[in-house]
Image: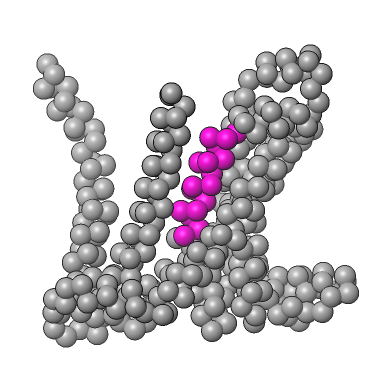
Amino acid sequence: MNTRRAGSGFAFVAPFLAAYVLFLVLPLGMGLVTSLTNASLTGGSTEFVGLANFAEALTDPAMWQSFGVTVGFTAASTPPLVLAGLVMALLTHHLAPARWLWRLAFFAPYVLPSSAIALIFTWIYQPDFGLADSLLSWLGIGPVGWLAHPVAAMLGVVVATVWWTVGFNFLLYLAALQAIPDDLYEASSLDGAGGWRQLWHITLPGLRPTTGLVAVLQVLASLKVFDQFYLITNGGPQHSTRPILQYVYESGFTHYRTGYGSAVSYVFFGAILLVTLTHLSVQRRRAAGGDR
């Protein structure tokens, strides 16, 4: 009987396992094999070079510059994405009239494709008639040149990313707010606690697990940034906004060095894996400390 149940259960998960192996495990293995060769899109003989591609990647200034752009973008975009999502959820949770409209307005940009986001913000950052410089000139500030200056271009992509993706964090926080028992707020009100005290002593502590989840998800998502940089700035000016995934793309499909591009992607994969394992280690230590 148990064998029959196990067999029927395997039949249900077999399609997923097949897709998992075909589209994830197999490409990972093929990519690793490719990273150990001098494979090229131009053809020719493919030779085994061992760890030579990895050694070149670790000493490549362009790779480290792209990695620094990715880390800088992650550090600049994660705090506002977490904070904005929290503030938006708090506003929506406490604004009774037209609450559905606030939810729609805050989440709607998240469903837009990256190409639409890039087109919108490319027009906003235009130096002659763009909305950004028009607002600055109304405030008495000269044109910035959003896509011509390295710092301004990075800031422009961060702003576009926050406007585009904050809706997901907003939904996570809103669901967590609705899960906090109303009894806590009622009891604190009877004890004379006002809105600010309830926020600091009930709401924010209750949202602490969600904040940790949102922060980790946002860090991982920001580390994998590619679309908005490629479409808005194309890595410019002078590669100052070229993330590492764009460098992988250029190495493999612009310079035709698929073996080297695969090696760079695995170096980046190792960095993401390190971040993930560090987070899991911290979470386990906190859980062990809480159990004590």
Taking depth in this image into account, of 93 and 11 the one nearest to the observer is 93
Q: Residue at x 62, y 56 (%)?
A: 162
Q: Position of residue 258 (x, y in %)?
A: 27, 76
Which quadrant of the structure image shows residue 85? top right
Q: Residue at x 64, y 74 (%)?
A: 151
Stretch of the chain drawn in magenta: 207-223
Which quadrant of the structure image shows residue 101? top right
Q: Position of residue 121 (x, y in %)?
A: 65, 68
Placement of the N terminus among the 4 image quadrants? top left
Q: Is residue 119 visible?
A: no
Q: Is residue 80 magenta?
A: no
Q: Position of residue 283 (x, y in %)?
A: 43, 38
Q: Position of residue 71 (x, y in %)?
A: 50, 64
Prevailing SS of the magenta stretch: helix
Left or right, 101 with reference to 118:
right
Q: Is residue 239 positioned above or below 266 on the image?
A: below
Left or right, 271 with reference to 12:
right
Q: Residue at x 15, y 79 (%)?
A: 46
Q: Is residue 200 positioned above or below 21 on the image?
A: above
Taking depth in this image into account, of 24 and 182 the one nearest to the observer is 182
Q: Residue at x 11, y 22 (%)?
A: 3
Placement of the C terminus among the 4 image quadrants? top left
Q: Is residue 212 magenta?
A: yes
Left or right, 201 with reference to 28:
right
Q: Is residue 77 visible?
A: yes
Left or right, 255 with reference to 92:
left
